[in-house]
Image (cartoon, helix red, strand yellow):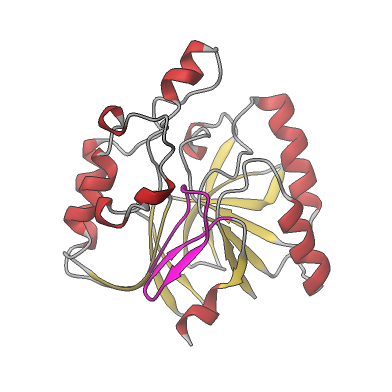
Amino acid sequence: MYYITGDTHREFEKVYELCENNDTTVDDVLIILGDAGINYNGFVYDSIQKKMLESFPITIFAIHGNHEQRPELLPNIKEEFDPYTQGFVYYEEEYPNIKYFKDGGEYNINGKQVLVIGGAYSIDKGHRLLNGWQWFPEEQLNERERAAIAEKAQGKKYDAVFSHTCPVSWEPVDLFLPFVNQSKVDKSMEIWMDQIKDTFTWDKWFWGHYHSDRYSGDKIMMYKEVQNFLDFFK
């Protein structure tokens, strides 16, 4: 089975419940659409979270969000070709059932062609810096990375796109926090995604980031709910 959900932010009750209620094994897959929260606090605390997650009978695949370090920058990270997704992913030897999609990676998930686009801007960046909390300067894709993805995807056909944020024209403005000055928010990722979304074709676009579950035909924003990925194509 292939399941999909939104941000977890180090809270894995829904993962535990998924495993308990569905009698999963490590041959089942859960896709997290960014901000899993397991590469946030540094080696010691993150290792506790990863060991717990590794103990669950399921294989995790995560894209990178904004409130976490990019997986390719972790000290013990390795790369391998993954048979579940037919593409190259990152992993740590100590946690073989936790894998990370590559930005711009193309994958085949049970016959569905998928493009992955991680990253987003942290609207609480200033607050985090002021309080000495974690903030990761590589949270968004840089211009070179964006250009490479745009060139790779142009003219192609994908069954699904996995991203953390979404094109700017799809932003759920009613969910914007009232105390955040939107004119100060860096929307370059969202604007870029809006520019490229019509340069290739896709059937379903999945994203997280906005902490709400909304399904609108081909546009799927996820947070708390865990769904069967393949059910969206029935």
Q: Classify the position of the N terminus by image quarter.
A: bottom right
Q: Position of residue 210 (x, y in %)?
A: 46, 48
Q: Is residue 218 magenta?
A: yes
Q: Is residue 14 magenta?
A: no
| Residue 57 shows in this picture | no
Q: Position of residue 34 (x, y in %)?
A: 51, 48
Is 191 placed above or below 220 here? above
At a point 23% along the width and 58% down the height, the residue shown is 152
At a point 48% along the width and 67% down the height, the residue shown is 86
Q: Nearer the viewer, residue 232 or 146?
A: 232
| Residue 153 shows in this picture | yes
At a point 65% along the width and 51% down the height, the residue shown is 98
Task: Name the quadrant containing residue 10.
Answer: top right
Q: Nearer the viewer, residue 171 or 77?
A: 171
Q: Nearer the viewer, residue 51 or 206?
A: 206
Image side of residue 8 versus residue 207, left or right: right
Is 180 placed above or below 202 here? above
Q: Position of residue 85 (x, y in %)?
A: 51, 67
Q: Position of residue 160 (x, y in %)?
A: 39, 70
- Which residues are drawn in magenta? 205-223
Is 60 placed above or below 79 here? below
Q: Disc count in the image? A: 0
Task: Name the quadrant containing residue 21.
Answer: bottom right
Image side of residue 124 versus residue 151, left or right: right
Q: Give the farthest residue toward the front.
A: 178
